[in-house]
Amino acid sequence: MKIKVISSNWSGERNYIPKEEETLYEIQLNKKYTVKAWEFSDAEGNKRKVEIFSFEITQIGDDYISIHCFQPFSVDEKGINLMGKKQDFTININKPIRLITLTIDYGDIFTLSLVK
């Protein structure tokens, strides 16, 4: 079994067309996966990195996995719950989940599914 992550984004900007990027990961218990990070230089010129989406697989079943995300997300909602604090999710075969960053005006969407 593998986990498929489709990374996309959204914007309140009119006529915005998001790009999608698909990545497959081998499933490994207690492994940390960093899907998206933002790298920048601070005012002193030091390189910094902020993780936008990373997770660890905490449980593996025959037809599901459980993950812990290191950032809170809004999940499978029509709108975005900016106060969302959910960080633990279960992904079942044939039931993808959509995780959305807690941001206004622009954000990231990560759709996770299991592939046999």
Image: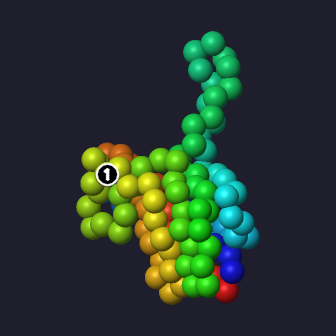
Taking 99 as reference, is 44 left or right? right
**Going 63% across and 34% down the picture, which residue do you hit?**
49
Q: Which of 28 and 16 is in front in this view?
A: 28
Crowd tier of the residue under label 1, counting other residues whose Cα lies within 10 Å: few below 14, some 14–19, many 20 or above? some
Badge 1 amino acid: Gly
Q: Quadrant of residue 14?
A: bottom left
Work out which quarter of the rendered image holds the C terminus and state it.
Answer: bottom right
In this rendering, the answer to whether 75 lies above or below 39 is: below
Residue 71: x and y in percent read: 47, 47
For the N terminus, which image quadrant?
bottom right
The structure residue drawn at horizontal position 27% and vertical position 54%, both measured from the top left corner, is 81
Q: Name the residue under label 1.
A: 84
Q: Position of residue 8 (x, y in %)?
A: 50, 62
Foreground of the two, 91 or 115: 91
Is the image coloured rainbow, by chain, by secondary structure, or in one colour? rainbow
**Does any portion of residue 19 appear in the rendered image?**
no
From what the image shows, is residue 49 above or below residue 81? above
Number of labelled discs?
A: 1
Picture residue at 51% right of the left edge, 54% below the top: 69
- The residue sitting at the top extreme is 44
Quarter of the view holding residue 65: bottom right
Q: 103 or 3: which is nearer to us? A: 3
Question: Residue 35: x, y in percent?
Answer: 62, 55
- Horizontal placement of 9 versus 59: left or right? left
Q: Where is residue 111 in the image (x, y as percent from the top left)?
A: 50, 69
Work out whether residue 98 can be spotted: yes
Q: Residue at x 61, y 57 (%)?
A: 56
Mark 1, secondary structure of its residue? loop
